Amino acid sequence: MNRFGCSKGQTEQMPFLIREAERRKTERREVSDEALVERAQAGDTEAFNELADRYSTRLRRVLYRITRNCEKAKEAVQEALMRAWLNIGRFEGRSRFYTWLTRIGVNEAYRGEKRSFDQTLDLYDSVGERVPDWGNRPEDIFESREFLAASERALGELPSDFRAVVTLRDVEGLSTSEASEVLEIGERALKSRLHRGRMALRAKLDGYFVEGYGQ
C-alpha cells in the first residue's frame, strides 16, 4: 500500500482513472441546459439531477442574500427543486432554466409571507436620494476583501425590495427581463427600483470611506 491507500497495481491505473473522471466531468459541462431539460421532461431523473447540481448552490446563495435567513434559504431550495421536478413538463423554454428555477425559489422563500417588494415604490422614495461622491478611487479598493465585506453587509441592510433587485441584477447578472420574471413585476418598475436600490447601497457604503477605509 502507498500513501494513497492503494496497491501498486491500483496506483498504476490512477492516471487513467483521473483522466476518465475529468473527461466525464467535461462531458457533463458540455451538455446544455436545454438538452438536460428535454431529457428531464422525458422522465430522465439523472438529467434533472445534473441541473440541480449545476444550480442549487447558486440558488441558495441568491435566496440567502434576499432573505438573510440561512435555514429559510436552504429549505426554499429543496422545495424549489421538488416543485421544478414535478412541473418540469410545464417549462416551455421561453426563459433560461435557471431563471425559471429562481422564480420558484423566491416564491418558496416567501411562501406565507407578504413580500415587501410587492409594496409600492412610493414608500421608499427618500431612500438613497443622495449619491456620495467617491472621487477617483483606485480600482483595487473596490476589489479588496474589506470593501466586498462592507458591500455584503450594506446589501443586507437594504429594504428587501431593493435587496432582491440589486442581488438579481448586479450580483447574479440577470437581465432586466429575467429579473422582472423572477420578481413578477414589470420591467419599468424593476428599472426604477434598481436605480433606487443602487443609490441606497452607495449611500450606505459611503460610511466605508468616511471611516477611513480604502484611503
Image: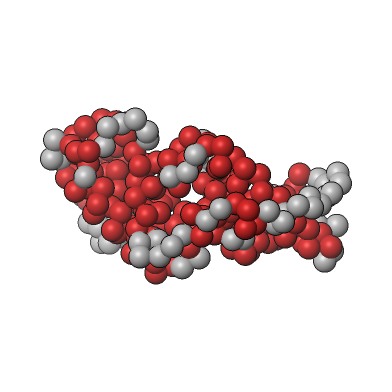
Q: Is residue 138 visible to the viewer in this orientation of the structure? A: yes
Check the image and report above or below for 71 versus 172.
below
Q: Nearer the viewer, residue 171 or 127?
A: 127
Q: Position of residue 115 (x, y in %)?
A: 46, 59
Snapshot quadrant of residue 213: bottom right
Q: Is residue 145 visible to the viewer in this orientation of the structure? A: no
Residue drawn where x is 34% and y is 38% of the image: 97
In the rendered view of the protein, which quadrant contains the C terminus?
bottom right
Horizontal relation, residue 166 to residue 128: left or right = left
In the rendered view of the protein, which quadrant contains the N terminus?
bottom left
Q: Position of residue 75 (x, y in %)?
A: 33, 64
Q: Nearer the viewer, residue 70 or 3?
A: 70
Q: Position of residue 50 (x, y in %)?
A: 27, 44
Q: Nearer the viewer, residue 209 or 68?
A: 68
Horizontal relation, residue 108 to residue 208: left or right = left
Check the image and report above or below for 77 versus 25.
below
The number of numbered discs placed on residues in the rendered structure image is 0
Residue drawn where x is 34% and y is 50% of the image: 104
Residue drawn where x is 37% and y is 54% of the image: 107
Snapshot quadrant of residue 77: bottom left
Q: Residue furthest left?
A: 43
